Amino acid sequence: MQGELYIVATPIGNLEDITLRAIRILKEVDIIAAEDTRHTLKLLNHLGLSKTLISYHRHNEEIKTEELINKLIEGKSIALVSDAGTPVISDPGGEIVKAAIKNNIKVTPVPGACAAITALIASGIDAKEFTFIGFLPQNKKNRKEKLEQIKNAEITTILYEAPHKLLQTLQDLKPIVENRNIVLARELTKIHEEYITGTIEEIEKIIEIPKGEYVIIVDKNQKTKKEIQLEELNGLSIKEHYEYYKQKGLEKKEIIKQIAKDRNVNKNEIYQKFLDK
Ligand code: SAM
């Protein structure tokens, strides 16, 4: 009979944040696949467990997936854990889950701590709807696209960030989120846990050297779709603004009237610019 793959959440700081079920599964499985075996060993020692550990991290995910799938096919049961929190979420594990499903191997989630959700629930930011982005991409183009997404987000956004990149990320977010509220949830479930709330400008005055782990929560853009569109149009040159309406099929007179309205200026002012058109 084939084995079963368990995706087991572990604490994000406070070692009490592990479920009774997670402890039982870690005890019962044949193998624990861990992002950093030394790190997981500390948890196992704390729980008084001695198990076979296999390293499974970002850089060996592909090779190890095959090895672990073979073990599952042989009938071994495996628990996958990451260094902290929920595997797969900005952590390795997605590949083995996909491969297991493809091989008709049962995949069972064992839920528990997740930094994003932990941060959100005590942030005071609207949690009805949210987007989880995880770490912003480092690639310039992809990063710009994600920032643009946050700029226009009509729902809460959750980001992860490493402490040494936090100030740069806040800098990048500043023109995007303007005066929207953001919350930095720091060192969750640990001794120095704190929530820092305010605009980026306010937060920058508080944080000099970021220490520990941070989740960034960005409040939704409260502006209406119409206000956002107006801002975008007014960011264009007059010529581009004109082209925008021209492509929509508007006549010259109508376009000038509309541009004047968008920019809250007298239509003669706009008309002067297009005398030669
Ligand atoms: N899979 C994990 C989870 O969802 O809980 C997250 C792993 S990700 C590699 C690590 C990032 O999660 C950190 O850079 C930080 O943004 C966030 N994080 C993890 N533990 C945290 C904590 N105790 N307090 C604040 N943020 C934390």
Image (spheres, rainbow, N blue to C red):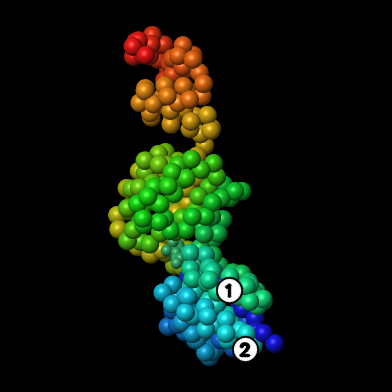
Residue 16 visible in the displayed image = no
Mark 1 CB within 8 Å of ligand 1: no
Q: Which quadrant holds the N terminus?
A: bottom right
Residue under label 1? 99
- Amino acid at circle 2: Glu
**Residue at 53%, 47% in the rendered image:** 156
Q: Position of residue 238 (x, y in %)?
A: 37, 22
**Residue at 49%, 74% in the rendered image:** 82
Q: Which quadrant holds the C terminus?
A: top left
Q: Position of residue 117 (x, y in %)?
A: 55, 59
Considering every residue shown, the one lying at the far right of the view is 1
Element at badge 2?
A: helix
Along the line of sight, the residue nearer the viewer: 193 or 152: 152
**Residue at 49%, 55% in the rendered image:** 133
- Amino acid at circle 1: Ala
Q: Position of residue 125 (x, y in %)?
A: 53, 48
160, above or below 34, in the image: above
**Residue at 35%, 51% in the rendered image:** 140
Residue under label 2? 74
Q: Position of residue 211 (x, y in %)?
A: 35, 62
* Earlier-in-chain disc, 2 versus 1: 2
Mark 2 CB within 8 Å of ligand 1: no
159, above or below 191, in the image: above
204, above or below 267, in the image: below
Along the line of sight, the residue nearer the viewer: 44 or 254: 254
